[in-house]
Each structure stands twice: as C-alpha cells, then as structure tokens.
Image (cartoon, rainbow, N blue to C red):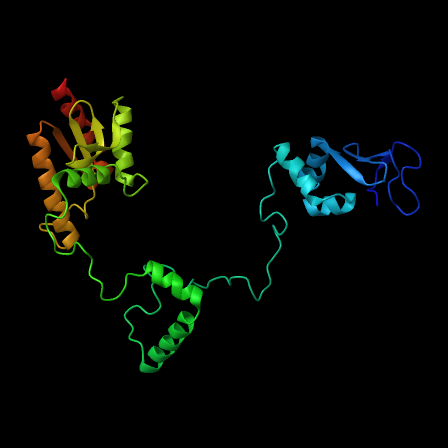
Amino acid sequence: MVLAGAEVLVEGALDQAGSYKPSQILKINSGFKMKVNREGKPNKWNVTKEFIVKEYVQNKKSLPMIAKELGIPYETLFYYKKRFGISSHSQNLWNKGVRLSPDTEFKKGITPWNKGTHGIVNAWNKGKKLSEDHKKKVSIATKKAMANPGVKLKVQRTQFKKGIVPWNKDRKGVYSEETIGRIREARLKQIFPKKDTYIETILFKILKELNVNFEKHKAIKTICQADAFVKPNIVLFADGDFWHCNPEFYKEAKTKVQTKNLERDRKADSKLIKDGYIVGRYWEHDLVNKRDYCKDVIVKLIKKVE
C-alpha cells in the first residue's frame, strides 16, 4: 500500500499483488526510498530527515503508524530518528486535551488521602505481633521453601549458621598493630556515602569561589577522613547539626550515634592538632544560613598558613 502523494519513479514498480519487482525504486512523499534485491525482498532502507520531520514532528504521527503505512519495520524508522537527532514526542502528546474517563479521573475538590502526611510508607507489620495461626502459616511456608534443594543450598551458603560464634568475638590482640594500621588506612579511603552530602557541596562551592585548590574526602594518615583538605595542613569538615550534636540545638547528646560521633570528633581533633594540622569544623546551620561567615573564617585559616 502506498501513501497519498507517492511517486513511482519507474513505471511498473508494483505488480497487481502490490509486491515490489526486482531492481526498482519507489519514492514516497519525496522522502522515502526503498531498494529491493533480485528476489524482490527489501534489503536497504533510506529515509531522509525531512521525511521524518514532516510525518513524525509536523503531522504528529507515531512511528508504528508511519511504519505500517510504508510497510517497513518500526525499528528502521526508530534507528533513523535517533540517527538524525530528532527528539521523541512527549508522553502526553496523544491524549493531550482529552478528558479521562469519569470513572478514573480525580474528582475536583477531593483531597488526596496522603496529603500533608509524613512517614506513611512503613512496613505493614511494624509494631504488630503475629497471631499463633499466622506463625504456623509462616512456619509451613518456610519449611516448604527449604524443601527446595536450590533454596536450601543458597541459604546454607549465605546465612551465618546458628550457634556458631565468630572466631574474634570479645578477643583482643588478634591483629598486630601493623595489620590494624592497614585496616584503618583502607577504611579511611572508602567514601560513605558515595555521593557528597548537601552541606559538603556547599563547603566545596565556597572553596571553589575562593579559588582554593582542595582534595575531597582525603584520608589524613590513620586519624580520620577530611571532607576537604587544603595543602599543606588545613583540614575542613561539614558537620550535620543532628549527627554531630550542634550545641545550638542540642545541649547534650540524646542518642548513641550522637555520643559516638562527639567522642570520635574530639579524638580526631586532638590528634590532628597534635600532628600540626589546622582544623576547621562548620555546622550545617551555618553553612546553609551564614555562608558569608563561613567563607570569612576559611579565608582567615588560609591566611594563617600563608
């Protein structure tokens, strides 16, 4: 089948059955060409950019629709569209302005059930105790799954066996000081989380604005990992208000994590200062709301070294 406006270059290119005869070329809308081999089967498609722009972009036809009208593979048109750098239609192009079914559309004036709520995505069984009947069902399902040799083997390989105590539990002096040093050094080179935090990005932007060369997440000996290190000896940290217990909001540590972080920060600062480093810690609240103040403090630290 040929689109309206098709031009047959050679008379007799199509037979009565609508199939292409050997060594003939059919041109459609001055943009599509198709070559056929001696057996009469298509072996090469040539589609111009102007043709795709006209049919796909201007006439807003879909690629499957165009492919069906031309009788060519959809993948061919998709390849040429990508090759010519023609962007795809937006997802709502076909139903833009079309009203959804009254049964499925969101009614005007109705408030979403989860609007303004927080923490709604929780485990369905959080805080719930299973009934005895439910426990029996779970037990039966587990035994049924473990009856599968593949599942049982996988569990045996990955699960820590019941009753086995780790060989180094509650033991001290297991590793030599050299080994401990290597473990600490390797750990300090690992970055957790792998992406920079929001307040770290603010600190990095301030340093870039000051045209200061620095290294991100630099391991300082076996002491700690600096958020930013400025040569020769300036160590900078961006501390979260909650995680590092900002005294402006927390008079004392309220969680085990805060207590642990406070103790670790104090030890790290003490060791760094003892080894001749200059330490600068900046609270999340200050980096977000007092950016200029933080910038001035960093400038003063750098001038001390110079």
Answer with left or right where residue 29 lies relative to residue 117: right
Answer with left or right where residue 126 lies relative to residue 29: left
Q: Nearer the viewer, residue 98 or 188?
A: 188
> Which residue sits at x=69%, y=38%?
58
Residue 248 visible (yes or no): no
Answer with left or right where residue 272 lies relative to residue 38: left
Residue 184: x and y in percent read: 19, 40
Q: Image quadrant of residue 26? A: top right
Of the 4 image quadrants, the one containing the C terminus is: top left
Residue 242: x and y in percent read: 19, 48
Residue 149: x and y in percent read: 43, 67
Q: How many marks?
A: 0
Q: Nearer the viewer, residue 62 or 183?
A: 183
Above-or-below relation of 52 to 105: above
> Which residue sits at x=69%, y=31%?
49
Residue 120: x and y in percent read: 35, 62
Residue at the bottom extreme, as displayed: 133
Q: Image quadrant of residue 78? A: top right
Above-or-below relation of 55 to 300: below
Above-or-below relation of 62 to 113: above
Answer with left or right where residue 97 lies relative to residue 72: left
Residue 188 visible (yes or no): yes
Q: Image quadrant of residue 61? A: top right
> Which residue sits at x=42%, y=70%?
145
> Which residue sits at x=90%, y=32%?
10
Q: Nearer the viewer, residue 223 or 77?
A: 223
